[in-house]
Image: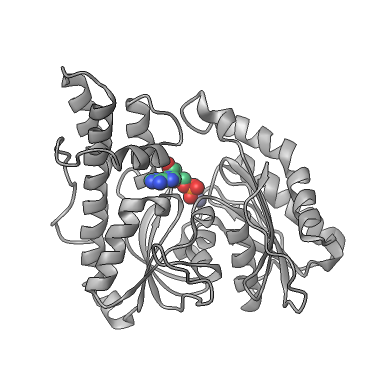
Amino acid sequence: MGAVHTNNGDDGRGVLCLGIESSCDETSAAIVDSNRNILAHIIYSQIPEHQKYGGVVPELAARAHILAIDEVIEQTLRLAGKTISDIDVIAATAGPGLIGGVLVGWMAATAIAQSTHKPLVAVNHLEGHALVPRLSAAAAGGNWSDNAVDFPYLLMLASGGHCQILLVRGVGQYELIGQTIDDSAGEAFDKISKMLGLGYPGGPIVDKRAKLGDATRFHFPRPLCNTPGCDFSFSGIKTAARIMLDKNTEPVDDTFINDFCASFQAAVVDCIINRLEHALGTDAVKSANPKTLVVAGGVAKNSAIRAAMEKLADDNGMVFAAPPMSLCTDNGAMIAWAGIENWRVGNIVREPVAPRPRWPLTEL
Ligand code: KG4
Ligand code: ZN
């Protein structure tokens, strides 16, 4: 269990929000203030518990959340030097995600809010990813911490469970421009890694290997590229990888693996850029005229995707922004920040909320 981000010492602070995240394999809590300071942040990752299965096992995840949640919340408060009475707003992920885990965090948040009579916000996990660039964002290599990303912005939201292009017009206002018709980008990274026997989660491993490889050695398809529209398809890339590996007669050594990862990643990058180019040409995006191109979600950690999107933004006279690495994959700070943004617009829980395994952003 480790603190990934602390920023104490702002006592002329505004509203304080405790955010709780438990929708997949991270039990996390954070205390964030409305001046965009992260006072404390704990992420307890269950990755070691799922690694031997090559992916997240929902029942194991739910049990691990139950065992960790109290400690994670207590440690977060201690680290911030606060007690629960100092907190103004409680927020937790209420979906979408693995329902066993979501229930754990949501019930903890509900119990705290009810016993302390504090406002409670039911955060959509995807909205957490979508809004966190407004808490903290940096252009690749640059430091952007003092500039909030303003609405509207064009968002590439790519995680293990989702792959969508969204026009973010405001809190709760998301227009879906394109989405995957099969796998998410994160899933594709994870599956390629599994096929190569590289481990879970695959994204960071493939990213690292790809940096050492030759992206022109293997030819992967670019599904849907250069066809009209903004939707994605990644299952064809995965199938092509399976066929290439089954037919392969060359030694699967480090060079082979690095080249395979580089070639695969280049195909994913091409698909993302092609779909974003189409998105920039849609009537909805043209009329909203967003000034910022943003990437968020776990896959936003990918160095090649960040670099290609930064170039695309430059070519289109836009600013590129991405959350810092620690705020791309699932975390409590993004939930706390979405809690503050929703609280500001009066979106607090007024009657019981049932957590939802499926909860599209367009249904907020
Ligand atoms: O947002 P996230 O933590 O969880 C979901 O909400 O799904 O995203 C996790 C995903 C995993 O599929 C993981 O392999 C991927 O993000 N990921 C990456 C990288 N780091 C994490 N994908 C590509 N490149 C990376 N560097
Ligand atoms: Zn996520």
Colouring used for the render? one colour
230 to 58, vertically: above or below: below
- Vertical placement of 255 versus 360: above or below? above
Residue 314 drawn at (x, y percent): 26, 72
Residue 296 or 320: which is nearer the viewer?
Answer: 320
Q: Is residue 160 visible?
A: no
**Could you tell me which residue is drawn at 69 percent across and 48 percent down?**
105
Residue 259 shows in the view: yes
Q: Position of residue 25 (x, y in %)?
A: 57, 40
Q: Is 66 on the left-hand or right-hand side of 125?
A: right
The residue lying toward the viewer, choosing from 85 and 318, is: 318
Q: Total of numbered circles in the picture? A: 0
Q: Is residue 332 left or right of residue 276?
A: right
Residue at screen point 35% across, 79% down:
291
> Residue 41 in the image: x percent, y percent?
67, 55
The residue drawn where x is 56% and y is 69% is 135
Instruction: Write down the quadrant of residue 204 in the picture.
Output: top left
- Horizontal placement of 277 versus 101: left or right? left
Foreground of the two, 195 or 139: 139
- Is 302 left or right of 262, judged from the image as shown? right
| Image position, residue 349 (x, y; %) | 69, 66
The residue under the point 51% across, 23% down is 52
Image quarter hosting the N terminus: top right
